[in-house]
Image: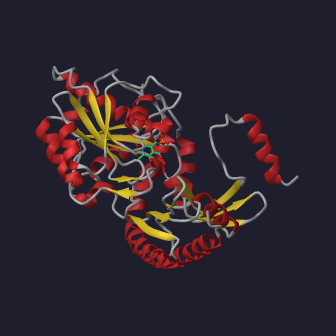
Amino acid sequence: MTPTESIVLRAQAVFTPNYRQAPVVLVRGLGSRVWDAEGREYLDCIAGIATCALGHCHPALVETLERQARELWHVSNLFYNPRAVELCEELVRGSLFARRVFLCNSGAESNEAMLKLARKYHADLGHPERHEIVACTNSFHGRTMFALAATGQPKYHHGFEPLVPGVRHIPYGDVPALEAALTDRTAAFIVEPIQGEAGVFPAPAGYLQAARELTRRRGALLCFDEVQVGMGRTGKLWGHEWDGVTPDLMSAAKALANGYPMGAMLATEEVGSHLTPGSHASTFGGNALGAAVALRALQLIREALPNALRVGARITERLDALRAGGRVVEVRGRGLLLGVALQGIEAGAVVSLARERGLLCNAIGEAVIRLAPALTLTEAEADEAVEKLGAAIAAAPAR
Ligand SMILES: Cc1ncc(COP(=O)(O)O)c(C=O)c1O
């Protein structure tokens, strides 16, 4: 039995069976490369599903983590620790709207905090009837109950009902539908600047601006879920910067600490001040290890933005050329979050064939390949990724 077979068998005997993991055991990473238990090397173009934005084991982050590990790990929220304060200051500095930050550990948790706060804000203002959340079909906001209820994909709801009441879904990008859905019972509209898990669909031009105007006019809060598109993924620090609008609340996670679990909810002063003492918490929120890494990651991600834009444009252009083969119908996305829409072949088959050729990417549904490599991907690596993906697409059996 190979080391891989042995670990996969042991995993299957002990893990809850909720993941569909590839039969690959990754044991080491550096930059955009990872190695498996058999010593095979891969170009990682999914990077922990858009978490390792600076690649694997970035030397500066390793140094930061090691230094912090020797100093202080965690003190809980009974006390202050300087790293958490520095991180929140930096997040506020890097935002055009936020003055308050709540730190947590994941995307779902940051969305949970965001939706809870939206309700509490209106309740505090004397309007508990304003408790409804408007969200989009095909959205993805996480697996905790409120985030799950906001997630507009019924396949994730099955078996977990009853969901949190008061959430309604409207088609993404549909301004009249949003206008009709916002009422004097609406607490907030939650939306992704690019729908990631739906298949990488950027918001249509003008949609987020319209959402800003309509929510303001109707007295509802605007919440951006930046878990996947934030932290430089699109070539700007936050995805909504492309649209020139700011929300009242925003969630972040994934790349925030480059793969170390970390989430954050950012809020305006007016709204954030309503998360009053005792109203919400997270035991590990703001832990010093994660905060130290996130602080350094923020700085390095800012430096990597020009590369993300340049390499993103190059890889998009080259992927676009694959359309000539007839199996790629569209290349969507922004910066280094890309969706390659396929026809006539299975995305899952393409992912397996790409892996055999030394490229890691993932399938969204049956017809989309997602690429979310490190923002530090080089041009040569981008070309290698396109070549390997092109070969996998060509080799996939017709369905
Ligand atoms: C837009 C968006 N929101 C929320 C989440 C949930 O994040 P987590 O898995 O860290 O809870 C994800 C995860 O893919 C996401 O893409």
Residue at 88% in and 52% down: 1
Left or right of 151? Residue 158 is right
Using the image, determine if residue 94 lies above or below residue 399.
above
Q: Depth check: give the residue in front, 287 or 178.
A: 178
Q: Farthest residue toward the left?
A: 217
Residue 130: image quadrant is top left
Using the image, determine if residue 221 lies above or below residue 317.
above
Residue 150: image quadrant is top left
Q: Depth check: give the residue in front, 323 or 289.
A: 323
Left or right of 111? Residue 259 is right
Residue at 72% in and 59% down: 36
Q: Depth check: give the residue in front, 237 or 354.
A: 354
Left or right of 163? Residue 356 is right
| Quadrant of ligand 1 in image | top left
Residue at 53% in and 42% down: 71
Image location of residue 190, percent across then percent down: 30, 41
Q: Farthest residue toward the front?
A: 399
